[in-house]
């Protein structure tokens, strides 16, 4: 077994036997990893605090060649994102980002930009509205894994310069007025949400969070992403259902 070291963020945990945990990490160096942390719930054992959800860690693990469950031997906390833990909205969106990342990524598929995206959004959840960060997170995650909606031109006739159009979640693409009848599920996509998504695709995280938008545009983007994920995801996300139920309370 090779000994490896990685920067990691805790996505989820599940009990294993009486005193251990199986932890799903997203790491900068290796992508998603599953690790076995032994003995973390024994009496006087304080290592369990390291594996709180959303913690940033440096981990040392024994990499098993014939299994995707590795043995975690050492951990050190590098970030706790304490500020996001004080607000229900922030905690809920952090859970959504973690669940979406877990479902859309494969083990041992390195994506340093996704690690950076999680870190960035966890830091800003303390001060920025969850819905605004969620749309940015979704677009950047989809871009990194190759699921990005096709928004450059009409997929059918390749007409460019579309300031608005009709988007088919089934096809994952934009269509012009003349071509939309071919795709019955294509729904109108106004200029403002289309422009915001194009901006997010082309620009880095810092300038993207400074982009202002009207409430109607935020609502339209949320509806767009809901339809897109409903079409694409095999299993509905628990956190998306929870967000739909409690968003009015934030």
Image (cartoon, rainbow, N blue to C red):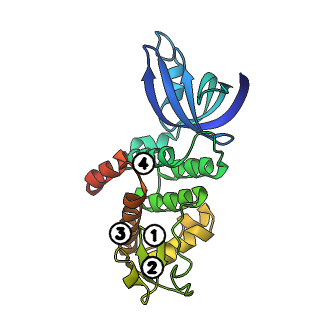
Determine which quarter of the picture holds residue 219: bottom left
Q: Residues under labels 2 and 3: Cα distance?
A: 11 Å
In the rendered structure, are the residues bearing label 4 and label 3 in contact, judged by CB atoms less than 8 Å apart?
A: no
N-terminal of the pair, mark 2 or mark 4, is: 4
* Residue at which label 2 appears: 192
Quadrant where the C terminus is found in the figure? bottom left
Relative side of 206 to 86, left or right: right
| Label 4 CA crowd tier, 10 Å (few <14, some 14–19, many 20+) | many
Q: Residue at (40%, 74%) from the top-left corner?
A: 217
N-terminal of the pair, mark 2 or mark 1, is: 1
Quadrant where the N terminus is found in the figure? top right
* Residue at which label 3 appears: 219
Is residue 236 or residue 216 the one in the foreground? 236
Q: Residues under labels 1 and 3: Cα distance?
A: 22 Å
Q: Residue at (54%, 67%) from the top-left corner?
A: 210
Q: Where is residue 180 in the image (x, y as percent from the top left)?
A: 40, 83
Q: Is residue 249 above or below residue 80?
A: below
Q: Residues under labels 2 and 4: Cα distance?
A: 25 Å
Q: Residue at (44%, 45%) from the top-left corner?
A: 99
* Residue at which label 4 appears: 96
Q: Is residue 118 above or below residue 108?
A: below
N-terminal of the pair, mark 4 or mark 1, is: 4
Q: Where is residue 189 in the image (x, y as percent from the top left)?
A: 41, 78
Q: Residues under labels 4 and 1: Cα distance?
A: 25 Å
Q: Residues under labels 2 and 1: Cα distance?
A: 21 Å
Identify the element where label 2 is drawn: helix
In the rendered structure, are the residues bearing label 2 and label 1 in contact, judged by CB atoms less than 8 Å apart?
A: no
């Amino acid at each position: 077994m090779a000994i490896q070291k990685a920067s990691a963020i805790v996505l989820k945990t599940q009990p294993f036997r009486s005193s251990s945990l199986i932890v799903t990490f997203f790491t900068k160096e290796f992508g998603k990893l599953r690790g076995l942390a032994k003995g973390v719930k024994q009496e006087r054992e304080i290592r369990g605090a390291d594996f709180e959800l959303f913690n940033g860690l440096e981990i040392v693990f024994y990499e098993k060649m014939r299994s995707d469950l590795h043995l975690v031997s050492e951990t050190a906390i590098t970030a706790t994102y304490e500020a996001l833990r004080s607000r229900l909205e922030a905690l809920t969106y952090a859970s959504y980002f973690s669940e979406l990342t877990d479902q859309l990524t494969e083990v041992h598929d390195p994506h340093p930009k996704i690690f950076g995206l999680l870190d960035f959004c966890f830091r800003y959840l303390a001060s920025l509205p969850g819905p605004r960060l969620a749309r940015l997170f979704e677009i950047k995650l989809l871009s990194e894994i190759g699921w990005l909606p096709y928004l450059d031109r009409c997929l059918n006739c390749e007409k460019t310069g579309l300031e608005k159009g009709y988007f088919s979640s089934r096809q994952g693409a934009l269509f012009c007025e003349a071509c939309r009848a071919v795709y019955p599920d294509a729904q109108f996509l106004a200029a403002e949400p289309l422009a915001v998504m194009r901006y997010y695709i082309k620009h880095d995280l810092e300038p993207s969070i400074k982009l202002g938008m009207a409430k109607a545009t935020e609502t339209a983007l949320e509806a767009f992403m809901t339809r897109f994920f409903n079409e694409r995801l095999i299993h509905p996300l628990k956190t998306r259902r929870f967000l739909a139920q409690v968003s009015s309370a934030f």
